[in-house]
Amino acid sequence: MDLTKGIPIIKYDNGMVLPLEDMVVKEYALTIMLDGEEFITLLCTPSSLDCLTVGFLLSESIIKSKSDIKRIRIDEEKGIAEVSTIDSSMIAKNLHGKRTSTTGCGKGSTFYNAVDSISCRKIMGSMEIDAKAILELMRDFNKRSELFMNTGGVHSVALGTDTDIMLFHEDVGRHNAMDKIVGEASLKDIELSDKIVLTSGRVSSEMLIKAAKAQIPVIVSRSAPTDLAVELASQLGITVIGFARGQRMNIYSNPERIKFQ
């Protein structure tokens, strides 16, 4: 499915008026049908929809692992993801009382609740990564943002080791891009406790809790974190790094994971 669309525009540039065609990113509505019932509609970029579906269900604690899913079928034309679970009664129990709304971009609604942070296990791993390696990863990360370079209309999220980027996704919503990373990692059985997440957008409390639930110990952004994200990161053992650009970065929590040479 095409991710961009050309539309006619009028461009004003230094006194000149020019008729041009501009490329914009497509915004797509994906409705998740859970055990035959309409569950939620996500506004997203129409790519890696299976990863988005699985990642969203994992990140919102609707399922515990991919083994809870019996079958998933994506109908791109209709914008439907049909998910059948092993134990639909347990899924219904997990949903009870969770529906809330947030300020997240790219979604009409979510099941996020700040109380979810209480159920997250503190990350205790001894992973270490060199500061220069982080900045090199960010340089690689920025070069991969093809859809952003073409449209300027998406966020990017990547999963990496201390030497390279393993997974990369772009989406109109940074939460969706994060869910695609979590979903693809789950589908490919990738261990996350020794990985880092790179993101183009701000590190909000929602993004932080998604990382915590996936047991990802380090999250790096070229933008800023929020105060609540830093507070939760300190409690949950996650290293948060912001403004990672060029030869600079700010470490906001758990700096012991970062090596300086």
Image (cartoon, rainbow, N blue to C red):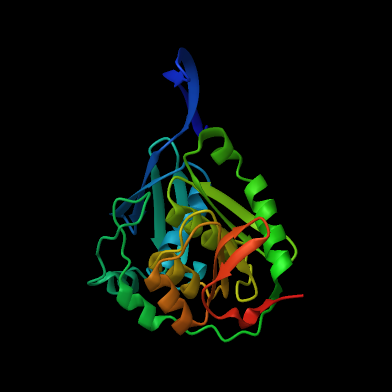
Q: Is residue 238 visible?
A: yes
Q: Position of residue 103 (x, y in %)?
A: 30, 57
Q: Position of residue 30 (x, y in %)?
A: 38, 45
Q: Is residue 233 above or below residue 207?
A: below
- Count of number-bearing discs: 0
Q: Residue at x 57, y 86 (%)?
A: 124
Q: Is residue 143 above or below residue 227?
A: above
Q: Position of residue 159 (x, y in %)?
A: 61, 61
Q: Residue at x 40, y 66 (%)?
A: 226
**Residue furthest toward the left?**
97
Q: Is residue 4 left or right of residue 10?
A: right
Q: Position of residue 29 (x, y in %)?
A: 36, 42
In terms of image quadrants, where is residue 158?
Answer: bottom right
Q: Is residue 165 visible?
A: no
Q: Is residue 123 left or right of residue 134?
A: left
Q: Residue at x 40, y 51 (%)?
A: 82
